[in-house]
Image (cartoon, rainbow, N blue to C red):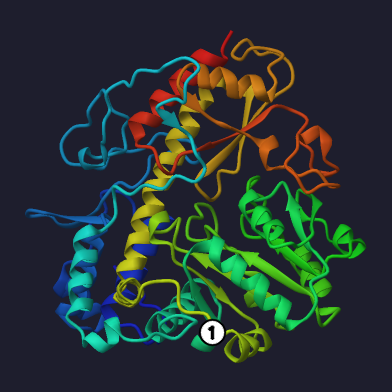
Amino acid sequence: MYIPIPGASGEPLYIRLYRAIREDCLSGVLRSGDRLPSRRSLARELHVSVNTVDGAYQQLVSEGYVEALPRSGYVVRPLFGDGAEGGEIAFSGPGKPDPSFPPGFSAFEKQDASPLPATPGQPGPIDFSPNGVDLSALPLSDLRKLTREVFALDPMMVFGPCEPEGHSLLRSALCRYLASSRGILCPPERIVVGAGTDYILQYLVRLLRLSGRIDGIATENPVYNKAVQIFSSMGESVTPLPIDGQGLRTEALRDCRANVAYVTPSHQFPLGIVMPAGRRAELLSWASASDDRYVIEDDYDSEFRYEGRPVPPLFAMSKSDKVIYLGTFSKSIAPSLRISYLVLPEHLASICRREMAFFNTTVSVPDQLVLARFIDSGLFERHINRMRTLYRRKKNLLVRELSGFGEALRISGTDAGLHLICTVRGGSSGLLQSGLLEKDLVAAAAAVGVRVYGISDYFLDRDSGERGKTGKTDSEFRIPEPTVLIGYGGLDPAALVRGCEWLKGAWSP
């Protein structure tokens, strides 16, 4: 058996071999139950040391791709069931699955699986929030170890002054991470680190004002409401623009006065639309047509894509250097970490260094140093791989449970992110009450102790920039049918199943 090692890179050989085998596991080249060659035989075939092969195998074992069995060697573990999207999830833990618990999750992933009492009319114990993340799988022992290492450093490095844009070690680590994961090539001088997306957007508005006049900020409609609130609170005019099945409509952007566009092209929030290459080119062409135009690319959940290859960011495609890239660790690690960052065009980075040096860094230096080590050690990438697998399983489980409504409920937005879009189809199928409005879906769910989120709350009224109902917007991508968001990131599997059962009771005839 021959497993190719990818071409030359600065990575150790064992990491390159680990990546090659991992990709074969994920792509189906290696299937559940396949035996890997012995360490010595593979080392001879690849002309590498046994230690190199052993290091790769141990990494695969630690991430759950393979397992070491007595007298059998290393065997590929079952990752998913035989079905595709929404299919059965294969149990991969030791022993037999607990019949009272959804298959596909080992015992350590269980939290409180006991039924929680629901109080009619009160906020329910099951919150399908699109903002939830799973904190149960954080590599706490690794983070504790890294924290101890950081506090063992020279006190001047840990407690001394720090550059306003963020610690140089973290910005350098971000450069390496973005180059390998997103194809973004930039020096550390173009990165600014800040205490969460809320702060970083306020910082960006101030920077754009220093670079010239802001004639308004155009946003997608529907949109991430917090960004609109921040722009508006700083006195900027916000213009919600219609979207279609390809994202923000660029003809509407050209017709409006705004010279800054805020977009989520890789996974539009909240509808999950992926902006295709042609529309991206149009957006970049709009930005390059004038010196004072910029595109703010919010790449808030790029790590969690479950189908196909990662979507390349606008920043990596831009040749005119007019894209401002915004990233965060709120989804990938934890919201309370409060670390986000900007990758700036060179001319904005120059203004930042020259005129915004009076800002102090807003993230504690120890936190920055721990995160830098987390990234550079490879532990962050391993954490992302584990979380991607965990979230994919949760998503498949949720799709399977919601499929009990049959064709009465259309499910979309399953390729990426941590939430689904559920739309009630017109007509009655017998599985869902007929005539339900969006507000009825939300209210009926709340009455049985479940919280879901109406899509209307994410649409803006064009004239006022305030939140409005779908029927009151001018978006060409109107949602004429009742639609709700259902998030799964922060819920354990038992709660997902229980919540869906309660929804069936609330929405069924």
- 28 and 133: which one is in front? 133
Q: Would residue 360 appear left or right of 348 to someone viewing this image? A: left
Q: Would residue 9 appear left or right of 115 to someone viewing this image? A: right
- 407 and 482: which one is in front? 482
Q: Residues within 10 Å of mark 1 (few under 14, many from 20)?
A: few
- Answer yes or no: is residue 89 visible: yes
Q: Name the residue at 22% across, 28% down.
A: 98
Q: Name the residue at 82% across, 56% down.
A: 249
Q: Would residue 477 appear left or right of 180 to someone viewing this image? A: right
Residue identified by numbered label 1? 358
Q: Position of residue 113 (x, y in %)?
A: 28, 28
Task: List the single residue furthest toward the top.
Answer: 509
Callout 1: SS: loop
Residue 441 is drawn in which quadrant? top right
Q: Name the residue at 82% across, 83% down.
A: 291
Q: Position of residue 20 (x, y in %)?
A: 36, 70
Q: Name the residue at 31% across, 86% down.
A: 160
Q: Position of residue 233 (x, y in %)?
A: 68, 57
